[in-house]
Amino acid sequence: MTFVFDPPAVPSVAVNGTDARLPVRRIFCVGRNYAAHAREMGKDPDRDPPFFFTKPADAVVDDGEVVAYPSETENLHYEAELVAVIGTGGQRIAEADALSYVWGYAIGNDLTRRDLQLKAREAGRPWDWGKAFDRSAVIGPVHDVASVGHPSNGFIRLSINGEVKQDADLNELIWSVPEVISILSHSMTLQPGDLIMTGTPAGVGPMVPGDVCRIEIAGLGQIDTRIGPRETGP
Ligand code: MN
């Protein structure tokens, strides 16, 4: 078979301790998964089933890269998140088995054009323009389960230019990683290379060009992202 033009490169993320990279298939994101963040977004935290949105696989950005301030926003936000990386595909996965489908974990930053997201939310429209833009998913090196186990507690912390903005514990997740995997897999067939961004704690806020955003999660090290000058084209 031939293609009428060259197919795009496979999006991928770094893996801790090796030059080999992990191919990315899809990026699923959990909305409002920490109670204090739900409240700061003007919503009641509850145990209603979690809801999801997605980002394109080729939105991934490595640790240490510069991300240009994106177009069409005046309110670019950071969101520190634990990312679970699926290594084995499956559907209708039982919660008790869910962790065996995980390849590893990474630190993520769910970059958000908050003004566009809130406008869409209020109008009952999709979140894509607020969440799924170019280079909107910073994903640090993936640590395999053999090295880090399955993190379910420990700090998750974000600072801008050294000033702490988010400081919480992974044990505050409303829906745990096994619960999220089980619920997602009853809706879609999970595949190797699917990333799940598990939600952000309270303290979200804006970044401007020149800011350096650092996220640390217990056991997973840290990642840094610098915000570059505003995009000029296309
Ligand atoms: Mn998020």
Image (spheres, grey):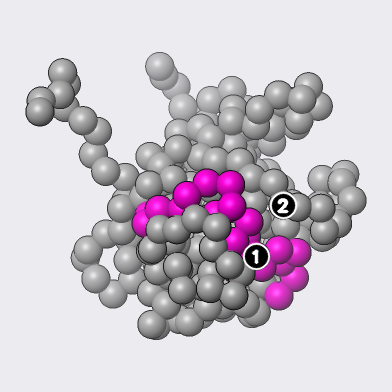
Which of disc 1 and disc 2 is earlier in sequence? 2
Q: Secondary structure at mark 2?
A: loop
Is mark 2 in CB contact (under 8 Å) with mark 1? yes
For residue 225, the mark is none
Image coordinates of residue 175 in percent, x first then y, are 71, 63
The magenta stretch spans residue 222: no
Viewer can see residue 122: yes
- Residue 140 visible (yes or no): no
Q: Residue at x 72, y 57 (%)?
A: 33
207 or 154: nearer the viewer: 154
Quick check: is the Cβ at mark 2 less than 8 Å away from ligand 1? no
**Disc 2 residue type?**
Pro
Magenta span of residues: 171-193
| Residue at position x 65%, y 79% in the image | 153
Tell me: residue 212, above or below residue 2: below
Q: Where is residue 177 shown, x and y percent of the image?
A: 60, 67
Give the side of residue 122 with respect to residue 133, left or right: right
Residue 135 percent location from the top left of the image: 45, 39
Task: Say which quadrant the C terminus sits in.
Answer: top left
Q: Going 38% across and 39% down the picture, which residue do you hit?
A: 58
The image position of residue 68, as x and y in percent, is: 46, 36
Q: Is mark 1 within 8 Å of ligand 1?
A: no
Left or right of 40 on screen, residue 59: left
Residue located beneath label 2 in the image: 50
Query: Is residue 175 within the magenta segment?
Result: yes
Distance of label 2 from label 1 (alpha carbons): 10 Å
Taking the image as shown, residue 128 lies to the left or right of residue 45, namely left
Q: Nearer the viewer, residue 1 or 63?
A: 1
Judging by the rendered image, the residue that carries numbered circle 1 is 179
Identity, as a three-letter code, of the amino acid under mark 1 = Glu
Q: Residues within 10 Å of mark 1 (few under 14, many from 20)?
A: some
